[in-house]
Amino acid sequence: MKITWDTVTIPGNQQYRAFDYTLSGDFSSASYFIAAGVLFPGTIRLKGLNMQDAQGDKQLVDIILEMGGNITFDGADMIITGGKQLQGIRIDASKFPICCRRSPYWVQLHRVKQTSSMLHKRA
């Protein structure tokens, strides 16, 4: 294969071999639903979020659990039951800035340090 700035050239006489592959769900996008599920009464079931995936934003789940949120797993499904008062904790925003952008809607996130990287985030 040859790649230039405007062309990808693939040599001929090749065979395509189909395969099945499942991509993990995106924790950054799911964080909105996870936060909503924790904040409001009711239950949300999210499919396809792999807690073994390398995505850093999955730490949101651990933070919510530490705050007393109700998140359980049923195979590959994440089940969030909300409406419970959360407890304040301390987190380091340099390791997980997306959580801090959601935290103004949560109860008592006591101390957040290392927030300078949040100035450059879009969400």
Image: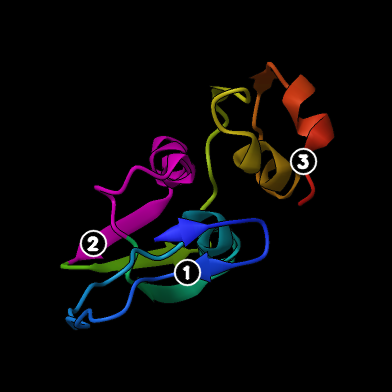
In percent of width and height, residue 111 lies at 67, 20
- Which residue is label 1 attached to? 9
CB atoms of marks 1 and 2 within 8 Å: no
In percent of width and height, residue 93 lies at 63, 25
Estimate the spatial distance between the alpha carbons at disc 3 and disc 2, rounded to whole Å.
30 Å
Task: In this rendered view, identify the residue nearer to me: 79 or 32.
Answer: 32
Task: In this rendered view, identify the residue nearer to me: 97 or 81.
Answer: 97
Q: Residue at x 48, y 63 (%)?
A: 82
Query: Which three-letter amino acid code belongs to the residue tagged 3?
Result: Lys
Span highlighted in magenta in the image: 50-74
Secondary structure of residue under mark 2? strand
- Which residue is label 2 attached to? 73
Estimate the spatial distance between the alpha carbons at disc 1 and disc 2, rounded to whole Å.
45 Å
Task: In this rendered view, identify the residue nearer to me: 51 or 44.
Answer: 51
Numbered circle sitting on residue 121: 3
Q: Is residue 1 above or below residue 64?
A: below
Tag 2 or tag 1, which sits nearer the N-term? 1
